[in-house]
Image (spheres, rainbow, N blue to C red):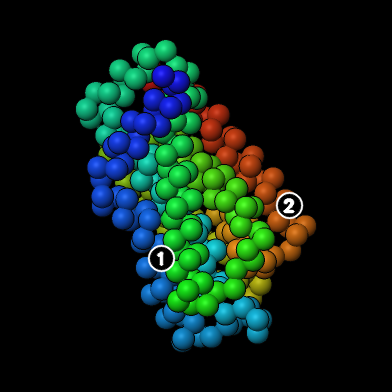
Amino acid sequence: MNPLAAVFYRESKIRATNTTFLFWDLFYPMCYLLVFGVGVNAALGSPALGAHVNYDSFFLAGVLGMASFGIASNSSWSFFLDRDNGIFYEMLTYPMRRSQYLLGKVLFNLCIGIVQAAITIAVGCALLKIHVQWSLLPLLSVVVIGGTAGWFFFYSIFALKICRNDLFNSVTSVFYFVFLFASSMFYPLDPLPRWFRVTALANPITWEVDLFRYTSIGLGVPKQLVWESIAFALFALASFAYAVRCLREQG
C-alpha cells in the first residue's frame, strides 16, 4: 500500500472511533456561530462593518478560521497517543519518508475541515440568512485545506518537541488565546488602536481569516489579500519543513 494511503487509513480509523473529537471538529464551530454570532449581532448590530454586512456574515469567516485552528490542534495531539502506545517509534522504522508520515496524518483532517466548513456555511445560510459568494467557494475550499494543513504542521513542531502532554496542552491554550483574540477573527481592525492593528496584521490567523472573509462573503481588499496569501503559504511551508526536521530528530 502507498505510505500516504496507509497513514491516511490508520488516521481515519483512529479518528472515526473518537466520536467526541469528531463532534467537536464538525459541529462545535456551527454552535459557536449560532450562539456567539447571533448574540453579538442582536446586541451590537453591525458596528463599523457597513450597512450591507451584519455581524453574522462577518463572523462566519472567524468561525471557519477557528475551526481549522482547532482541527489542527486536535490532530497534532495524536502524536502523544502514538507515543503512549508505542506505534510512533515503530512507524519511524517503516519504509516511508518522514514527510509522508506528516502528510498522511493531515490528509484525513483536511477531509474533516471540508465537511465542517460545508456544514457551517449551510447552517449559516439556512438559519442566519448569510449571503455567501457561491462562485468563490472553490477558493474557500483551497483556504480550508491550506489553513488546516498549515496549522497542523505548526502544532506538530510543538507536539514533537514537547514530551509532556500537560505542557503541550498548556502551550496550545496560550496559542489559542493569543492567536485568536489578537486577530481580525472577532472584530474589524480599522477602529482599533494602531498597536493592535500592527500586531493583528502580523498574525497568521488574521491572514487566514481575511482570506475566508473574502471567499465566503466577498469582503476584503484584493491587494492586501494577495500579500496575505503569500505570507500564509510561506508560514505553512516553513512549518512543514521544520516539522519534518523535528520528526527526523526523533529517531
Disc 1 marks a residue whose amino acid type is Met
Q: Is residue 173 left or right of residue 133?
A: left
Looking at the image, which residue is at 31% across and 55% down?
23
Q: In the rendered view, would you say 107 is above or below 44?
A: above
Q: Quadrant of residue 104?
A: top left
Looking at the image, which residue is at 43% across and 27% down?
5
Query: In which quadrant will I find the N terminus?
Result: top left
Query: 29 and 163: which one is in front?
Result: 29
Looking at the image, which residue is at 64% across and 52% down?
139
- Residue 224 in view here: yes
Residue 149 place in picture, x, y as percent:
51, 41
Query: In which quadrant will I find the C terminus?
Result: top left
Mark sitting earlier along the chain (2/1): 1
In the picture of the structure, the residue carrying the numbered disc 1 is 30
Disc 2 marks a residue whose amino acid type is Val
Q: Is residue 109 left or right of residue 205?
A: left
Q: Quadrant of residue 51?
A: bottom right
Report the disc number at residue 226: 2
